[in-house]
Amino acid sequence: MLTKYRRGIILVGLGLAMVAAGCKKKVKITPPPPAPTVTQPVEAPTAKAAVLEFSVEPTTIERGQSALLRWSVSNANNISLDNGIGVVPANGTRKVIPSETTTYTLRASGPGGEAMATTTVTVTAPAPPPPPANATPTGTMEQRLQTEVGDAYFDYDKGDIRDDARAVLAKDADALKSIFAAFPSATVVVEGHCDDRGSAEYNLGLADRRATAAKDFLAQLGVPADKLKTVSYGKERPQCTEASEDCYQKNRRAHFAPAQ
Amino acid sequence: MNKIFYGFLVVLTAAGVWSVQGQDARIGVVVSGEKPAIAIVDFRGTGGAQPLMSSFNGTLFEDVQGSGLLRVVSKSMYPLQNPQRPEDFKPSSGQGMAMLDWARPPVSTNYLAFGYTAEQGGQLILYGYLYNVSQNNLQSAQVIGKRYFGTLDDDGARKVAHEFAADIIAQFGGGSLVGSRIFFVSDRTGAREIWSMDYDGSNQKQMTFYKSLAIMPAISPDGARLAFTNFAKGTPRITLISTETGRSLPFYNQEASLNTTPSFSPDGKQLYYASSASGYAQIYVANVDGSGLRRISNSHAIEVEPKVNPKTGNDLVFVSGRSGPQQIYRMNSEGADVERLTNGEGEASNPAWHPDGQHILFAWTRGYATGAFNVFTMDVATRQFNQLTSGAGRNENPSWAPDGRHLVFMSTRSGSPQIWTMLADGTQVAKLTTKGSNRFPVWGK
């Protein structure tokens, strides 16, 4: 333990002597004291400048991104980077934003000579910017609901989602997600409707099934269920009143409206 | 009540026989009836009462005629004169001042209603008499001799006419409809609101002002409370109001997208309704404030319109899609002993109990196109049914009058949904509403 401690002191002393020697050029050099414990010969004071490290992270960037140069130089008193950076300290980092692939050169010179190192940042072209979205959604939430979210239609006395309604609701799901992104506080009412033929009372129950089925389907496709409320209007709010199958079909629907 | 109802079934049967013979079924109903005949003179009034007599005479005639208990002899048969007071009677006249003039052909009536009105102290006073003109002497002939008071206007004239008519009808076993009210839904203000009217269509009054959708009313057995389906808070929920004040009464709606088709228990302490709380609309019962709710039905089908038997209080009819298209079912109040009452044909809806607890009215498309409902009755025990309307428009939401002889229903036979009344034998059809479209009638006390 004691021996180790003594050896440490000696090494520190030696280091200090070396630094002193390096800083005081031309001054008469005091020879190092005999150090019987040191077996390695001490390096000459006029050691050649050395680049210990010169790197860049990351080595590849997209145009517009930055990279970090990192260097460490010894035995040099004049250190510089090219590409307009200029003089730098012996140890340091520098953020660079090259617009194209660039090789940086680090030059270091000292009393013992010069050193040089290079490192390259590869700049790749970024992905092309996205084109404007097709039919950029604009307008009020009401307008968007009306134009982008279609009705799902049902068979007589049925609350099951038909194949054609599946396709419509899949599109509706995308549109609703976009609308909720644009109007985060919005809530949408899924209205259930029936044609005029069944009894008004039973149709309240049937339209409730239709609204719930449409909501559940949309929720499965990732539309937040807490933003969809259901209301059964039975046959009390028909959108057409003729006694024809065309009209009956128009009324057997799940319809989307802004919540009040 | 029961007897009277069967009486009508007999009458209907008789009508069928007459039809076979190539005669009008309606004539059969009239001729085959054992109804006593009554002559009702045109009453006259003095002073300020005189201008009100048109309202009075019309109301009196329609009430007595509408009871279905008496045959009112056509006025064209009447003699030129008539008594206004008992002291006007003469032993013989030939001009109408003797009882015999009325008992003999061509009038051939059993009873004579007469009297007069006058203005007295700013009030309207009616002296109303009913005489059995087949009696030999005036003393034994008098059935009614009574004074009635009302305000000196058309309302007062109708009031005293209703009261006199009620006394006449009561002599022939008829519960009176006077004072009974029909509740219904009208869109005449633009929104669907609950309205009320007298049993004859007069006095139509708006009861709710939600400017939304208030539909499918039910009336409590005592007539004091209305329950209905109300969209005022966005989703269909049940609202109770006082028929007296119009104020809403507390009712707890369970968490559900749909709470609807309420109806009262016979004691008025419970409310049956349909709720989608568990998915499909199912039948529930709760205290009249909505507390203590309990699910009754348990099926994977839409079930609405629970109606509890007014006599037993523990079996109910309801509408279910559990076997396909909507049909009428019955079950006990525990949800057990479920049986289908209609045979699966067409679509059936709107069951309504007769006060006797043995028969229901309902709407059925049996024999007609989808959506073409007609009013039927059914003996719940035997499932024998009778069709009361025949294809003239849609005929739905039948409801018995408290007298168990009249019914009110919605019909589109005149081109738009309106409220109609008739006797259970299909006669005395009357249209009570004209403004806007009018639906969902229920007849209260």
Image (cartoon, coloured by chain):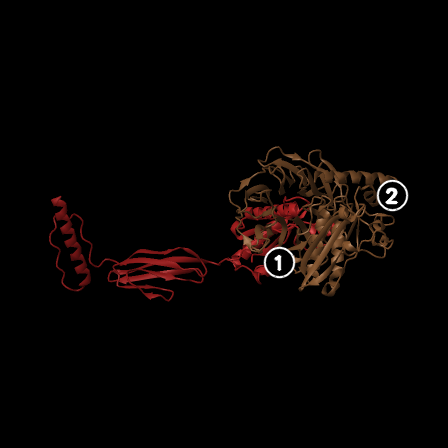
Nearest to the observer: residue A123 or residue B150: B150
* Residue type at the position of mark 1: Gln
Residue A146 is tagged as: 1
Nearest to the observer: residue B50 or residue A56: B50
Dot 1: what SS? Answer: helix
Nearest to the observer: residue A234 or residue A18: A234
* Residue B103 position in % (x across, y down): 84, 48
Dot 2: what SS? Answer: loop
What colour do you see for chain B?
brown
Residue A48: image quadrant is bottom left
* Residue B435 position in % (x across, y down): 71, 59
Nearest to the observer: residue A19 or residue B121: B121
Chain hosting mark 1: A
* Residue B211 position in % (x across, y down): 61, 59
Up-down: is B164 above or below A84?
above
Mark 2 or 1, which is nearer the eye? 2
Q: Is residue B410 visible?
A: no
Chain hosting mark 2: B
Q: How many marks?
A: 2
Describe residue A101's horizontal placement relative to residue A194 as left or right.
left
* Residue type at the position of mark 2: Gln
The chain coloured red is: A
Up-down: is B201 above or below A158?
below
Describe residue A172's horizontal placement relative to residue A16 as left or right.
right
* Residue B98 position in % (x across, y down): 83, 52
Q: Which residue was labeled with disc 2?
A: B23
